[in-house]
Image (cartoon, helix red, strand yellow):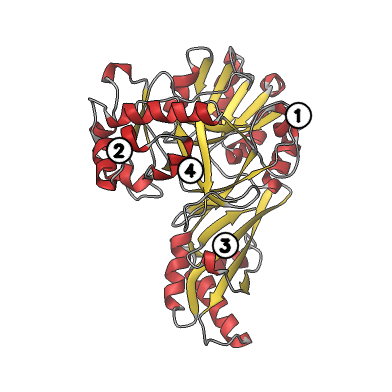
Amino acid sequence: MNNENFLKFKKLLTFAFKNKYSDFYRVKYEKAGFNPLSDFNSIDDIRKIPFLTREELAQEDSSRLLFIPEQEVKAAIPTSGTTTGKPFIVFHSKDALGFPSNCGIHQKKVLILMNSFVAPSIYTKLRETNLVLAGDIFNLPISCLLASKVGINHILTTPTLAIMLKEHLANYPDFQKNIRSFFLTGEMVSPEKKRLLQETYPDKEIFIHYGTSEFGGWPAVQCRVLAGRGGEVLFHPRVEDCYFEIIDSKTKEDVPLGEQGELVLTNFKDWATPLIRYLPGDLASFTENDCPCGAPSPLLQIWGRTNYDLVRAGGFELRTEMLEKTLLNLQNYLQDNFEGHIYENFVGNKPKIKVVLNLSLKEGVKESPELKQKIENEFLENWQLSPRLNLKKAMEAGLFEPLQINLVKFPKSQKSRRVLILH
């Protein structure tokens, strides 16, 4: 397998470095002092390959991100710019990552309920082998009406929209009966939300796939066994199409099995915009593969987003930047590292969110009840969930449980740790 991956990397690196349509990687690698033609001689040399970041792609003119003739492009997919503050476009060819062959969605009738950034790319991939209806996420009743008329039997949407869809499906019993499966993507799914989805649709198959806009598809997917399990959401990495690494954000070395680190992806399949050692901004871990379906490699678990990003829970966006702004007000007392653990609990089908913050006092600062109350008040008042709603008001409205703050000592290896993790 290592030799096979080496050959895939060598071919991809040579294509990107010598490309006649774009000098993006040639300039990038020359600046870094890396020549893939002479410096990459075994799979161990992967550590020599510079990382690719979202910020780099956002700064580039879209023309320099196209590596194939324009007539071969099947889709040009924009990102929302949530992380970088600036959207960018990634091109995809006919080889773009679509649905895996064993996911049960071929030759079917599919309703897509996704936002405007994602829907066109998914539609492009599905329409060659399926009847595809692009629904309106802002008008679910009409989407259900139209889907019932054409006999839709699969729905591709986000977990949140799947839950919202339930009340509208009740008005179309034949349509609801015809639905065989849901394919969910675009959001982190906690074990609690997974349980709610399975209870909401007990007679349907619910597949959760891990994807990124940049990949234009799903680098990691669920088989029927993983889809039917309770508990944590786990994925099969598509190792035939992608190369997965999980690294320590500080040392850039691989982390051991079971430990969390930053995900690194390389797309072997789609060369329209080559993504080589790409950092999508996700915190992940590998775990032992106990799935009987026969898929190779360890299972993948996604824990949340890495630095300077957000977690979506219960319809709210919780951003690390708001924690950082509050930490500035407390810089005389606290280190600038943190862990935010977001627990998405449900009462019936209504979410109630609990936030647990692990913070670290500066050396010489003594813990006291008064100081802990001051820290809590700062976060309650200054963590804005919307222009008019802060964390304190959300708690008073019963949308959030009381904030829990733990003052801890982070290991030396985590001095720069700033993460939000959805449970």
Point out which mark residue 21 bears: none
Give the secondary structure at mark 1: loop
Question: Neighbour class for label 1 at 10 Å: few (<14), some, many (≥20)?
Answer: few
Determine which residue is flagged by label 1: 292
Q: What amino acid is labelled 1 in the image? A: Pro
Where residue 194 appears, as percent x and y from the top left, is 69, 42
Left or right: residue 278 compared with residue 208: left
- Mark 2 or mark 1, which has the lower sequence index? 2
Question: Neighbour class for label 2 at 10 Å: few (<14), some, many (≥20)?
Answer: some
Rounded to the nearest angstrom, the CA distance separating label 2 from label 4 is 20 Å
- Mark 1 or mark 3, which has the lower sequence index? 1
- Mark 3 or mark 2, which has the lower sequence index? 2
> Which residue is at 69% across, 19% downward?
178
Q: What amino acid is labelled 2 in the image? A: Asn
Point out which mark residue 340 bears: 3
Quarter of the N terminus within the rendering: top right
Question: Neighbour class for label 3 at 10 Å: few (<14), some, many (≥20)?
Answer: many
**Cβ–Cβ under 8 Å for marks 4 and 3:** no
Q: Nearer the viewer, mark 3 or mark 2?
A: 2
> Which residue is at 46% across, 57% downward?
307
Determine which residue is flagged by label 4: 264
Give the secondary structure at mark 3: strand
Q: What amino acid is labelled 4 in the image? A: Val
Where residue 376 appears, as percent x and y from the top left, is 57, 76
Q: What amino acid is labelled 3 in the image? A: Gly
Rounded to the nearest angstrom, the CA distance separating label 1 from label 4 is 26 Å
Determine which residue is flagged by label 2: 35
